[in-house]
Image (spheres, helix red, strand yellow):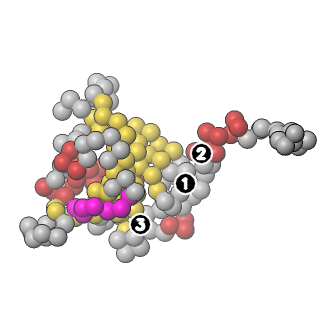
Amino acid sequence: MNIIFKYRMLSDESDNFVRDFEVYPDMTLSEFSDFLLRALRYDDCMVSIFKSDAEWRPVEEFAQIDMGDDPGMPRCMDNVKLMEVNNDFHDRLIYTFDMLNNRSYYLELIDMQRPEKEFTYPRVAFEHAPVPDQYDPEATEQSGSIFGELMSDYNEFDGDDNYDDES
């Protein structure tokens, strides 16, 4: 394939956690899910992938189990390719890995690019902060905020306490 999708993954459990993944758009959602579980170093588990709108509201569900072709039932991940679900910048997916506790990751398509010869795909292109614990959200290690790191240059601003904007 002559194009790579680049997804950014975020977590609502850790403001610090960021992962960028580069994958082939012709991967099935099942292959994509298997790659994500390996990249996160999670045990195999039952997952669902949801296509979402711009406000992260689920629009369509894709399940690991084939539930038939009944309308209203989720389509099977084995039969759907990434490029069928996402094909525009900023298209979004919700990756639910713990359905009992409603724990998910949020993925946004941030780039489409040509593959680089020196890399093997799929791959983790960027990572920041530890991965949230698969089983215990309370055990998630919090490290420095990526936002805090980016904004640290501006934290040293010393305003003039004597400034009066009514003069």
Q: Which residue is mark 2?
A: 147
Q: Are marks 3 and 1 in contact (CB under 8 Å)?
A: no
Q: Which residues are magenta?
A: 56-62
How far across and how far down the image is residue 28, in percent? 19, 50
Which residue is most to the front? 167
**Which residue corresponds to the image point at 24% horizontal and 39% vertical from the top-left?**
24
Q: Which residue is nearer to you in this view: 119 or 96?
A: 96
| Residue 144 visible in the picture | yes
Residue flagged by tag 2: what amino acid is it? Phe
**Which residue corresponds to the image point at 29% horizontal and 38% vertical from the top-left?**
5
Residue flagged by tag 3: what amino acid is it? Arg
The C terminus lies in quadrant: top right
The numbered disc on residue 54 is none
Q: What distance separates the C-alpha of mark 2 from that of mark 1?
A: 8 Å
Q: Which residue is mark 3?
A: 103
Q: Which residue is mark 1?
A: 15
Q: Are marks 2 and 1 in contact (CB under 8 Å)?
A: yes
| Horizontal arrangement in the rendering, residue 85 relative to residue 17 (left or right) | left
Q: Which residue is nearer to you in this view: 32 or 10?
A: 10
Q: Earlier in the sequence, mark 2 or mark 3?
A: 3
Q: What distance separates the C-alpha of mark 2 from that of mark 3?
A: 23 Å
Q: Earlier in the sequence, mark 3 or mark 1?
A: 1
